[in-house]
Image (cartoon, rainbow, N blue to C red):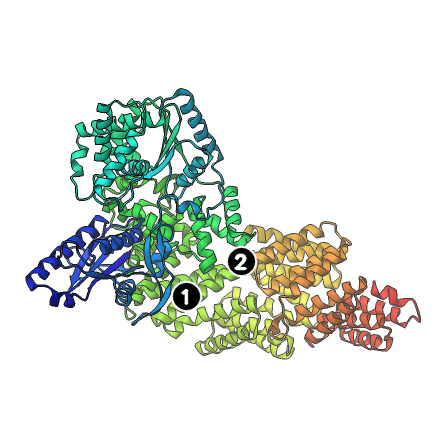
Amino acid sequence: MTVLFADIVDSSTSTRSYDAEVLRAALARTFSRTREILQAHGATVEKFIGDAVMAVFGVPAAHEDDADRAVRAALALRDVVASPRPDGRPGFTLRIGINTGEVVTGDLEGAESLVTGGPVIVAARLEENAQHGEILAGPLTRELTRARIRYGPPRTIDAKGMGQIEVAPVEGVLGAWKDRSALPTSPFIGRDAELRLLGEMRRRVATTGRPHLVTVFADAGMGKSRLAGEFLATLSAEPAARVTCLPYGRAITYWPLQELIRGEAGISPTDPLDEARAKIEKRVSELAGFDEQERRAVVRELTALALAGPDGEPSDLTSELRRRELALGMTRYLEARLGSTPGTIVLEDLHWAEEPLLALLEELLEHLRAPLLLVCLARTDLLARRPNWGSGRTNAIAITLEPLDRGETERLARELLGDRADERVREIVIRTEGNPLFVEEYVRMLEDQGSGTIVPPTLHGVIAARLDALRPAVKRLLQEASVVGREFWLDALPNERASADADADEAERRGLIARTAMRGPTGTHTYSFRHGLIRDVAYASLSKAERTQVHDRYSKWLERAAGERASEYAEIVAYHAERAFHFAHELDPSAGSDLGHRAFTLLSRSASAASARGEFRTARELIDRALAVADSSRIAAAERASAHALSAIVKLRLDSDSAAVGELDDAIASARAAGPSDDLVRLLIWRASSVTIFEDVAGARDLFAEAVTVAKATGDPGMVAYAVWASSEPMGITGQLDEQARLLSDALAQMRAAGITQWEVSCLTEIALNAIERGDITLARSRAREAVALASRGGRRIDGFKAADAWARALLASGDPDAGAAAAELISLARTVGGHWAMARAAEVASLARELAGDVDGASLVLADTLAQFDSTRMPTQREAIARLEAMRSRLALASGDIATARSSAGAALRAAPPTHVAARASANLAAAAVAHADGDDKEARRLIDDARAVLAPTQYGGLRERAEHMAREVLQPSGGRRSSAR
């Protein structure tokens, strides 16, 4: 809302200049006139404080132009309460401050103060800093009125208690059409068909010589005014006018016709009444076709219309008899004015027209014998009270503007942004849903403030006004529904009432919601907000206390309604429980413990489920939120243990950095103190597998052994099978592949005997990868195919990725041409799973597949893009992956003749390779040996190869051993080996 403070300056000086009784009477008249002016502009006068008045615009009902009303009211006050007075009575000077922002409103019946909040304080500070006779506007007020109000140079003031604020003095009102036509406009997109239709109607008017009515219906922002402006621009020297209906004030019944006549006669706002009458008479006299009696009658009616000001009695004009007389006067004038030349009148905001004006326009169209095209712009609200507007006439049509389609919206956004800006364009398309005004305002917001999901204030007022125009019950329904989301069900709302269906029907008739064919969790109809921004504004109008209640109620309702399908809605239930707690905690930090405990439990449960599905980014977000709730609601440490364990594991999987390792160690210490648990088993395995194993294989074996012991202590056969499977990893690291194969086979048998499926896919993929390294491609393909089938049935992302990785590697090992397609699918799955581990696995497979297909440059590009995201010093758990990728990049660079990159990557591989990891160390040595051989340093090459052969000798890494022996033979050749080793 917008708040206005106005203060009479130096009334004490006036007290010394005038008799006290005279001054008192003058002040009383001033205050009375001030109240009248403010209320005429739609304000609620909250209070008079000494010589000052405070008024609010937008309470109790919002209007889309509340800021504009406040500024215009201020200008009117300054003009009326001016010094000196021509009659010698005391006059006063005002200081005025105007500010716009979000406030909390009190109970209109009994609140001591109608509104409270920072914007009220700022408005008072603006008034205090204004000069005599000055109107100062705050930044948001200026932003909302920039297209209609002229401001002076901005300046910064020190607002006591509120900091530095940029303000601007109000200078006046911009011209209704002439001034604004010079403002930059957005591209005209998506309305060509409607523009052609208006052109066709104009040609029909010219041909028939009869008036025609075109009513353009659309919601706010859909482009009615822009369409009319483009149409007017196509007219050459033909008579044309653009007028508008006002939503507030006195003497506005025929305001558009007043505007039209004053424009025709050249009457300015400052003209004295006699001069204005003379201008009307002169204008009518210039037209041919009137006898003296007709001329006087037309002048009389036009004068009555145009000069019925706020001090007159305009109500006399709205009687049925007078309306007909006025219509006759306008008819005669337009017939003489136009003759046979077609003319156009654009009448904006017809939905605000009062009934006498609508009736007068209908009579005008009925009796006029002149080629006039009347283009009326209106929102569909008009049809709620005038459902038959324009119908039944042969000379009337209606046009409804639909939202721009996706392509048109993208085009408009791109042209406004001035570049491709794909991410920002996508955000705009999603948020604006084809409304051109919304697109323009979102572009302006993004340019000024960056990305965000707030509703721009320029749009907030438009939508809030629509909501405040509803019956209270209908508005309340929409507010409660907004808590549910874009889609909602009536039985999910609190305070169920018999009128809910009727209230929803009314909201649907007004174009705010729509009933869809879908059914909700309980089988009831699903409703959807017509526009996401309607939902956002409705939600913003609820207090935090109300949001707490509705979020909590809906969370519990959905949990009950979901029944056996509760897992599908678990994250939604958790979200609403979380929101209920946060709002309650904001209002009273000591309250809401029950809400906090419920939110923590639901978020933790959802995070665990997401992790089990392999959705690690989602799991991290959920567990972080759960721990934040725990911190705010003082959840006991014992209850937080599982959450901390999951947080540590997920962050290690996604980030792989030292901070994640530290969090893992903290979680292990807490879990050990609490005793044997599933969480401790998982934490020990992750510590052993991801951290310890690369530096201390013996230490890793000890941790794995501890994990098996703890798993047995839990009594859970599934955890025991999991620990046994995981403990096979040191054998793979050290190259004891036969022993690893035996342990993996035992683990798989234990899982299947216990009916445990959670780790079955992982175990199968490990068996397949082990078989590839040992050269048993038949077993590898069999186990990988089995894993793919199980993962497909289970639906867990991480299982799908692991199975796809094993299958792609089995295809590569057998030279299968389908390996390329499998590698491409793996890349896509890696992006879905997230984390550096998945990225590295997918990049290795993809580069191998491209190399197999002869695309060495493409293979190198994949590796370069991936390695750019890795840092061995910051990611100790990813050193093995970095070493393997760098070794591959070195080999590919050497094959392409890029010796510099080959040398650099080989060095990086040597530095990153963990000393305990046989395959990574041997691969790095062989890559470096190939570079040394290409450089002619065969002594260094032989040393590196011998180191690799020594590391591989006691292992079952058949492929690597064969490669090392092949390189050794090449280096021992006296010549010709350099080129082949590069290959």
Relative side of 707 to 943, left or right: left
Relative side of 964 to 806, left or right: right
* Quarter of the figure with residue 230: top left
Q: Position of residue 280 (x, y in %)?
A: 26, 35
Q: Label 1: which residue?
A: 626
Q: The residue tagged with tag 1: helix, strand or loop? A: helix
Can residue 387 be seen in this snapshot? no
Q: Position of residue 944 (x, y in %)?
A: 80, 75
Q: Label 2: which residue?
A: 755
Q: Answer with mark 1 or mark 2, whichever residue precedes in sequence.
A: 1
Q: Nearer the viewer, residue 1 or 493?
A: 1
Q: Nearer the viewer, residue 677 or 386?
A: 386
Residue for point 71% across, 56% down: 810
* Quarter of the figure with residue 782: bottom right
Relative side of 441 to 388, left or right: right
Image quarter of the N terminus: bottom left
Residue for point 26% across, 49% down: 476
CA gap between label 1 and label 2 equals 31 Å
Q: Nearer the viewer, residue 157 or 329?
A: 329
Q: Nearer the viewer, residue 478 or 609?
A: 478
Can residue 937 be seen in this snapshot? yes
Relative side of 659 to 52, left or right: right
What amino acid is labelled 1 in the image? Ala
